[in-house]
Image (cartoon, grey):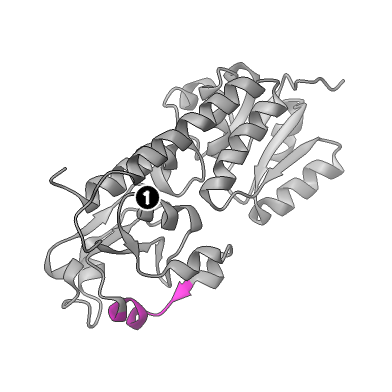
Amino acid sequence: MRYFPPRRIVCLTEETVETLYLLGEQDRIVGVSGYAVRPPQVRREKPRVSAFISADIPKILKLEPDLVLAFSDLQAEIVSDLVRAGVPVHVFNQRDIAGILAMIRTVGALVGAVDRADRLATSYEQRLAAIASVPRPLPKPKVYFEEWDDPLISGIGWVSELIEIAGGEDVLPNLRFQHAAKDRIILPDLVRETTPDVILASWCGKKVVPDRIRNRPGWSDLPAVRNNCIIEIKSPLILQPGPAALTDGLNAIVAALWPSG
């Protein structure tokens, strides 16, 4: 039997988990991604049923979900297996701030919490506007964001927007329109040509090693390297297109660009 609002939800990525907790609808969650760490109690409260591009389909089916929430083409095979098994699935594909806000409102609609979701999304909109309106010194710091180190990958859409909201200038702004990581692969020389003042790095699933960045051929003369402005932002804060990116992720970017406050 299927219910609306759904009583049993499996979330295959973290951002929908966090959103449901923020809406007070966490009791509906019966399974989560192994990468879900926000809020902290999710690690002890909810069973883990998936990685990012793989999932334990039999385990999910045993949970008898009314709805599975997935993300992007990268989970297409998981979704296909679930659909063939008769499980209702909603796949999000948010790649920018507008998409994140729409995701929050959509999750709210799916669980019958339209007003709460709208208030939550509106609160983020207001906070983003307030941070964007803070007077900052000129010129704006030039920022290179690195999602991966081998090969170099940059340009996630929502991160590029957050850099601008924080008062910085993304040195590779056109990459934000490329959804697939393979289309955001760049050559080291391209970064050298942009002469970034700040390097923000978040290597998905592994710790950033600043010396690997400093020691790249020709990078020692970059302002960011000379001035020791290579800063790691933890992946769960910035690489998940959800509430965390709009709060702690943005806070980390602001602190990196304006360390004196």
Q: Is residue 13 above or below residue 145?
A: above
Q: Nearest the camera: 224 or 1? A: 224
Q: Residue at x 49, y 68 (%)?
A: 175
From where the camera sits, is residue 38 visible? Answer: yes
Magenta residue check for 180? no
Q: Is residue 243 left or right of residue 180?
A: left
Q: Is residue 82 left or right of residue 252?
A: right
What are the residue bounds of the magenta stretch? Answer: 185-193
From where the camera sits, is residue 49 visible? Answer: no
Q: Quadrant of the N terminus?
A: top right
Is the stretch drawn in magenta largely helix, strand or loop? helix
Q: Residue at x 26, y 69 (%)?
A: 196
State which quadrant residue 4 falls in. Answer: top right
Spot occupied by residue 40 in the image (x, y as percentages of width and height): 41, 26
Identify residue type, mark 1.
Ile
State which quadrant residue 108 falls in. Answer: top right
Magenta residue check for 189? yes
Q: Quadrant of the C terminus?
A: top left
Q: Which residue is mark 1?
A: 165
Q: Nearest the camera: 78 or 92? A: 92
Q: Residue at x 55, y 70 (%)?
A: 182
Spot occupied by residue 197 in the image (x, y as percentages of width and height): 22, 66
Spot occupied by residue 206 in the image (x, y as percentages of width and height): 37, 53
Q: Nearest the camera: 128 or 235? A: 128
Q: Is residue 199 left or right of residue 87?
A: left
Spot occupied by residue 66 in the image (x, y as percentages of width and height): 77, 26
Q: Is residue 227 left or right of residue 25?
A: left
State which quadrant residue 2 falls in. Answer: top right
Q: Residues within 10 Å of mark 1 (few under 14, many from 20)?
A: many
